[in-house]
Amino acid sequence: MSALETGVRGIGCWQPGHGGWPELRAWLRGEATAGTAPPRPPASILAAGERRRAPPTVLLACEAAAQACAMASLDPAQLPCVFASAHGEVAISHEMCATLATDPRALSPTRFHNSVHNAAVGYWTLATQCHAASSALSAGPGTLAAGLFEAAALACAEQQPVLLAHYEAAADGPLAQVLGATTSHALALVLTPAPAQGDLRLRLCPQARPAAAPADSLALLTALARAAPTRLELDAGGDRHLQLEILG
């Protein structure tokens, strides 16, 4: 298929040791040692009461998304957004399964409310008063590729910037053995339809990804930090892969 080209106007991230893009970029370039990110993403865009109630994935996604919007100098209320996570709120899912197995009547409606897959984008749109189009998606191991392609296609089709937030939380208990999610992290990009510094070219290919180490969000951030022409192959699920070029 034809390639999509987008610019990257804003970048946000959070992961253990790195609470934002400037310090992570310096670390990826070998210019600094690991930082000292707080144990929980501050997610200051949320009201204090919402921050107390919000589960970890909401804090992750909202913190990275707010950073990307700030770097882009764009009002998040005006940005269509795509929130992508393979597994959603795994800690609450584990807790709910354990409760159902031992004392089903004790299941908390509030915990259930925060377990749904669109919880993060719901908190985000309420906090930012965003009435633009929003979506929450999951595609298993192809989630990052699906989120990138969805956001890029929307930016090109609508000719306006689009926010992408990709996030995962560390799993606990039996789910950790099944999902293999050992660390929490979030990446957010504001993609624009007009190429700019840090351009991306995306092409969805109807073949399985070539046999190589799969690219992930850290590989994408590493390529963006180095600002050199790079090609990544992302698993897009099934018999497809996303060919992603950083044009430098």
Image: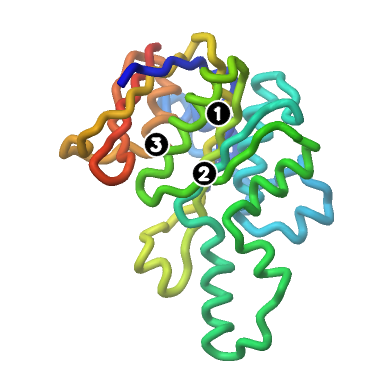
The circle drawn on residue 84 is: 2
- Say which quadrant the N terminus sits in: top left
Q: Is residue 22 visible?
A: no
Does label 3 or label 1 sit earlier along the sequence? 3
For label 1, count other residues whose C-alpha is less than 10 Å away and answer few (under 14), some (14-19) or many (20+).
Answer: many
Give the percent coordinates (x, y) of residue 197.
50, 10
* Tag 1–tag 2 contact (CB < 8 Å): no
What is the three-letter code of the residue carrying label 3?
A: Ala
The residue that disc 1 covers is: 189
User: What's the CA distance linking mark 3 and mark 2?
Assistant: 10 Å
Does label 3 or label 2 sit earlier along the sequence? 2
What is the three-letter code of the residue carrying label 1?
A: Leu
Residue shown at the point (49%, 9%) measured from the top left:
195
Residue shown at the point (65%, 69%) measured from the top left:
112
Q: Nearer the viewer, residue 138 or 219?
A: 138
- Say which quadrant the C terminus sits in: top left
User: What's the CA distance linking mark 3 and mark 1?
Assistant: 13 Å
Q: Nearer the viewer, residue 232 or 80?
A: 80
Q: Quadrant of residue 35?
A: top right
Give the percent coordinates (x, y) of residue 91.
55, 66
Q: Quadrant of residue 3?
A: top left
* Tag 3–tag 2 contact (CB < 8 Å): no
Q: Above or below — where is 27 with respect to 183?
A: above
The residue that disc 3 covers is: 145
Give the percent coordinates (x, y) of residue 43.
71, 44
